[in-house]
Image (tube, helix red, strand yellow):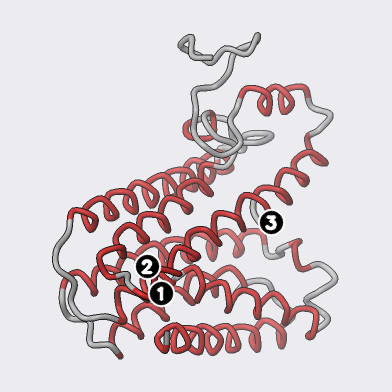
Amino acid sequence: MSDFLLALCVSVLVNALFFAVAAARKSDVVTDLSYGLSFALTALLLAVLRRASDPLRLGAALMVAAWALRLAAYLFARILKLKVDRRFDGRREKPLEFAKFWILQALSVAVIMLPAIAVLSGGPPALSPLHLAGGLVWFAGLAIEAAADAQKSAWKRRGEKGLVDRGLWAWSRHPNYFGEILVWWGLWLYALPSIAGWWRLAVLGPAYITLLLVFVTGIPPLEKSQDERYGADPRYLEYKRRTSVLFPLPPRRAGGKAEGGRP
């Protein structure tokens, strides 16, 4: 598990540098940017240190980096417009309190990356159908997350009122989170041919991000915020009634039926 400790050290270093900038400037601009870059830099540096020149190991690093850089670019563009991340109100002015976010983020990056670290830490694996299956699940997750983010951005550019309820958002209230979960379970499938011994614990990576998004830092606070903001709007209540929380499903009609007759 020495490569996990190496990945953790890289993640801690990257987040410490971003924390220093954010705390000194009392700014939220780099907080979300640091999340994606932590993954990308950790994966690529580990690939270099482990000389992962074969396609399958290098592929794992590039899958992490591609997902991470797209997300970092999207979140960075968003915070440049918003200027402030309300999650850090009352915290950014208190360095010790602010540091808790960065410590948790550094640890989370290393844990979530366990499947990719497992691939990079070993020798070149033999080609397996699981590499293709995992790659397809990863790509589906990346496509869903990117499409959901693009649809939400387009909705806001048009000046639409309320929550986006078109496209993927008509089938799931959090399709971006669903896509991110698929990305990491896809990477776990991709890593299975490389997993043995202690690396069986790599399943903790996708399990951790799933639990985090579904029960802790993802859906619950966002649903609470939306309820407080839109709870008196009948259109919002109808949207919640007809739309799946996470897994994309056809919108439900009145009387409990989904569009197309599916119960």
Q: Which SS class for mark 1?
A: helix
Residue at the outermost front position: 197
Kindly indicate whether the residue at mark 2 contacts the one at mark 1 (C-beta within 8 angstroms): yes
Assess disc 2: are there few (<14), some (14-19) or many (≥20) residues with their C-alpha within 10 Å of its C-alpha. many
Considering only order in the chain, which callout, 3 or 1, is on the residue closer to the N terminus? 1
- Report, in whole angstroms, how far the alpha carbon at label 3 lies from the one at label 2: 23 Å
- Report, in whole angstroms, how far the alpha carbon at label 1 lies from the one at label 3: 24 Å
Q: Which residue is mark 3?
A: 216
Task: Name the residue type under label 2.
Answer: Val
Q: Residue at the spot x=41%, y=67% of the render? A: 69
Kindly indicate whether the residue at mark 2 contacts the one at mark 3 (C-beta within 8 angstroms): no
Mark linked to residue 40:
1
Assess disc 3: are there few (<14), some (14-19) or many (≥20) residues with their C-alpha within 10 Å of its C-alpha. few
Q: Quadrant of residue 44?
A: bottom left
- Report, in whole angstroms, how far the alpha carbon at label 1 lies from the one at label 2: 6 Å
Q: Where is residue 64 shown, x and y percent of the image? A: 37, 67
In the image, residue 14 above or below residue 79: below
Q: Residue at the spot x=18%, y=77% of the render? A: 124
Mark linked to residue 154:
none
Q: Which residue is mark 2?
A: 64
